[in-house]
Image (cartoon, rainbow, N blue to C red):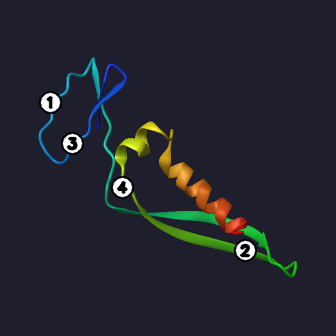
Amino acid sequence: MVFASAAFCLSQGPRLIFISRPIDRFVRVSLRLETLEVPAQDIVTRDNVTVKVNAVVFFRVIEPQKAVLEVSNFLYKTSANCATTLVDPW
């Protein structure tokens, strides 16, 4: 993804892209399958038993424009969302 003068300019696939350093900014987003370990969480079951649960999340970025422009840190957001869902699934 290339940003020109702090505005989104273009998103291209694998090819040669020329950017001018003072004006443009280049952001690389991996579109491969990523793994993210969710920290251990203490949860309380329906019958009031405390259980420590940890998880591993597999995800892939489908829309890199949204991952960069709409969220400040999409890896942290994914981890926080998974931890919240793990603690309170319903």
Q: Quadrant of the C terminus?
A: bottom right
Q: Amino acid at mark 4?
A: Ile
Numbered disc in front, either 2 or 4: 4
Binning the other alpha carbons within 10 Å of mark 3 as few (below 14), some (14 to 19) or many (20 upward) gives few
| Dot 2 or dot 4, earlier in sequence | 2
Disc 4 to disc 1, how far (Cα)?
24 Å
Disc 1 to disc 2, how far (Cα)?
50 Å
Disc 2 to disc 3, how far (Cα)?
43 Å
Residue 32 lies in quadrant:
bottom left
Q: Is residue 48 depicted above or below 63 in this figure? A: below
Q: Which mark is residue 52?
A: 2
Residue 46 lies in quadrant:
bottom right
Q: Amino acid at mark 2?
A: Lys
Q: Is residue 84 depicted above or below 44 in this figure? A: above
Give percent across and percent down for residue 71.
Answer: 50, 41
| Dot 2 or dot 3, earlier in sequence | 3
Q: Quadrant of the N terminus?
A: top left
Tag 1 residue: 18
> Do the residues under discs 4 and 3 have CB atoms within 8 angstroms?
no
| Dot 1 or dot 2, earlier in sequence | 1
Q: Which mark is residue 12?
A: 3
Tag 4 residue: 62
